[in-house]
Amino acid sequence: MLNIQISETIKQTIRSMQFGLIEASGVSVHPSNVDFDNELKKLELELKEKYQDIAPSDDPVVSAVRRMYRQVGWEPTKYRPSSEALVRRLLKGNGLYRINNLVDYGNLVSARYHIPMGLYDTGKITGQAIMDIGKDGESYQGISKPEIHATGKIILRDDKGVFGNPTADSARTCVQVTTQSVLAVFFAPSAIERDFLQKTIDELAAYYNLFSKKVETQIQTV
């Protein structure tokens, strides 16, 4: 399984953090079908019922993720964690962007458990993957934006540069029909119980087993 190295900067700045990893190989990438539509409808109902009288920011998981962002000086109300952005989109009745089965189910699980997730084509990751804080001047090409500034943000970097953060993935390592293996990374603060994070990655692993020859999971801690 692909190993992610933790930088000393992360260890000194955040001190305690955990992330759930799912690596799926021999994947089949294609548009999502009616099964996904049904799962999405269920999630939309769950979220609308849960947030009838409270805001997403009142949820303890959302709050913990926001605190993790603020530990590195990253304002989560300006750069929303991807999971919170998905929840808010669903509550507004805007649905989810349909990309492909692997991305779609990743977004579904991230929204359900409120933990931000990045999804990467492992064949496009060069050398050692490192979790770090973005350095001055670092940026990368996003999937929907030409340039995403990485300075001061929690990021993943390889030999070619930054390839993602808990808010936005990169164009360079995005999942396409030619992708053969993927790595999903759930970025979780230590305040989230390990069993909850395990449940999160187990659910996505179960979905990915439908489209993959092999699926492995792991939780790493800082």
Image: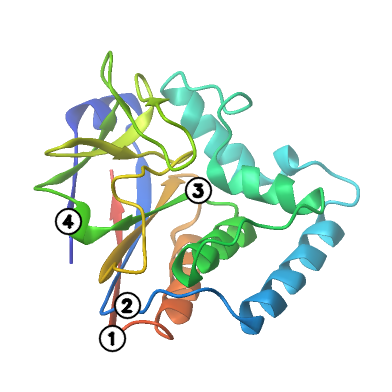
Q: Residue furthest left?
A: 127
Q: Quadrant of residue 77?
A: top right
- Mark 1 touches mark 2? (CB < 8 Å): yes
Q: Which residue is mark 4?
A: 3
In this image, 168 relative to 214: left or right?
right
Q: Quadrant of residue 124?
A: bottom left
Task: Find numbered disc 1 in the image and state the secondary structure of the residue it sits on.
Answer: loop
Using a 10 Å C-alpha cutoff, classify the residue at mark 2 as few (fewer than 14 neighbours), some (14 to 19) or many (20 or more): many
Q: Which residue is mark 1?
A: 213
Task: Find numbered disc 4 in the image and state the secondary structure of the residue it sits on.
Answer: loop
38 versus 128 height, above or below? below
- Find the distance from the CA under tag 4 to the CA under tag 3: 19 Å
- Find the distance from the CA under tag 3 to the CA under tag 2: 22 Å
Using a 10 Å C-alpha cutoff, classify the residue at mark 1 as few (fewer than 14 neighbours), some (14 to 19) or many (20 or more): few
Mark found first going from the N terminus, 1 or 4: 4
Mark found first going from the N terminus, 4 or 3: 4
Mark found first going from the N terminus, 4 or 2: 4
Task: Find numbered disc 3 in the image and state the secondary structure of the residue it sits on.
Answer: loop
Mark found first going from the N terminus, 1 or 2: 2
Q: Which mark is residue 27?
A: 2
- Mark 1 touches mark 3? (CB < 8 Å): no
- Mark 4 touches mark 3? (CB < 8 Å): no
Q: Which residue is mark 3?
A: 116
Q: Residue furthest right?
A: 53
Residue 157 picture location, percent across and down: 22, 38
- Find the distance from the CA under tag 1 to the CA under tag 2: 7 Å
